[in-house]
Image (cartoon, helix red, strand yellow):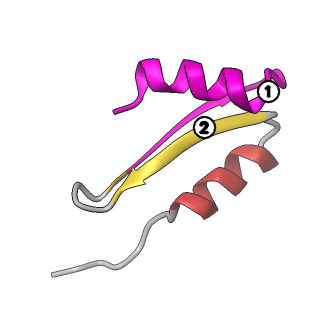
């Protein structure tokens, strides 16, 4: 039985930004049905967020 509820990546990213995070990096893996986000309270710039995120996210 499918519940068909949950977050999409864009909704999850928006929630993080509304919560006060300045920079986010992440993605989705549709084949695995998962979402990944690393969020930063400081504005570290998108390039540094990507570098850091790639060290932690699949």
Q: Is residue 20 above or below residue 18?
A: above
Residue 33 is left or right of residue 8, and the answer is left
Where's the N terminus, which quadrant? bottom left
Classed neighbour count for the residue bearing mark 1: other residues with Cα under 10 Å, few (<14), some (14–19), many (≥20): few
36 drawn magenta = yes
Q: Tell me: 18 left or right of 26.
A: right
Q: Which residue is mark 2?
A: 25
Q: Is residue 9 left or right of residue 3?
A: right
Write down the residue under mark 1. Answer: 45
Residue 56 occupies which quadrant of the picture? top left
Which element is circle 1 on? loop
Which image quarter is the C terminus in? top left
The residues bearing labels 1 and 2 have C-alpha atoms spaced at a distance of 10 Å
Rendered image quadrant of residue 6: bottom left
Q: Is residue 20 left or right of residue 38?
A: right
Q: Residue at x 79, y 27 (%)?
A: 45
Residue 21 covered by magenta stretch: no
Q: Which residues are magenta?
A: 35-58
Within-10-Å neighbours for mark 2: few <14, some 14–19, many 20+: many
Q: Earlier in the sequence, mark 1 or mark 2?
A: 2
Establish if 12 lies above or below 44.
below
Residue under the image location 64 percent in, 51 percent down: 13
Residue 57: mark: none
Residue 39: image x %, image y %? 64, 31
């Amino acid at each position: 039985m499918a519940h068909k509820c949950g977050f999409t990546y864009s909704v999850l990213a928006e929630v993080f930004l509304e919560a006060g995070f300045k920079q986010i990096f992440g993605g989705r893996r549709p084949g695995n049905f998962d979402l990944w986000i690393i969020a930063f309270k400081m504005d570290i710039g998108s390039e540094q967020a990507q570098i850091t995120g790639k060290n932690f996210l699949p």
